[in-house]
Image (cartoon, rainbow, N blue to C red):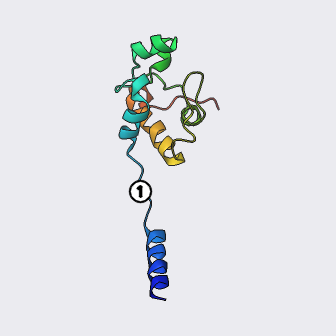
Amino acid sequence: MTALMTLLLAASAAAQTPAAPSPPAPLLYVTKCANCHGKDGKGVAKMAKMLKAEPAKLDLTDDAATSDADIVKMITDGEKKMPAFKKKLKEEEIASLAAYMRVLSPSAAVPPATEA
């Protein structure tokens, strides 16, 4: 009986333990994105050459015309040679990465105009 109570208490405590918090966006960016896009978001020429991609494709600093939803979709589903992160990152991590990428783009301080 004592063993059963101990087991139930341990299971209850484990169920109440909160999940580990997600890493902050800058750390996620450095670990998941910077190898290709560079720490400053301007792209890594060496990676562009290795991927046989235009260096501008790896530059995130001029993405003001790209919507937040499109950035989230690119991170989630990947695009061309960029891998998908939907099975590697939580939705909130993807959203925080998309928001962080806006910080890398000085022109994104003002959202692009939309047609009415």
- Seen from the viewer's position, the closer of residues 11 and 28 is 11
- Seen from the viewer's position, the closer of residues 47 and 55 is 47
* Vertical comparison of 111 with 51: above or below: below
- The image shows residue 94 at horizontal and vertical percentages of 50, 41
* Vertical comparison of 40 with 52: above or below: below
* Vertical comparison of 84 with 14: above or below: above
The local secondary structure at tag 1 comes to loop
Query: Where is mark 1, residue-wise?
Result: 20
- The image shows residue 42 at horizontal and vertical percentages of 39, 20
- The image shows residue 53 at horizontal and vertical percentages of 52, 13
- Res 25 → quadrant: top left
- The image shows residue 34 at horizontal and vertical percentages of 39, 28
Residue at the spot 43% in from the left edge and 16% down from the top edge: 47
The type of residue carrying mark 1 is Ala
Task: Judge whether residue 55 can be spotted in this image.
Answer: no
Residue at the spot 49% in from the left edge and 89% down from the top edge: 1
* Vertical comparison of 16 with 113: above or below: below
Q: Which residue lies furthest to the bottom in this view?
A: 1
Residue at the spot 57% in from the left edge and 40% down from the top edge: 86
Q: Residues within 10 Å of mark 1 (few under 14, many from 20)?
A: few
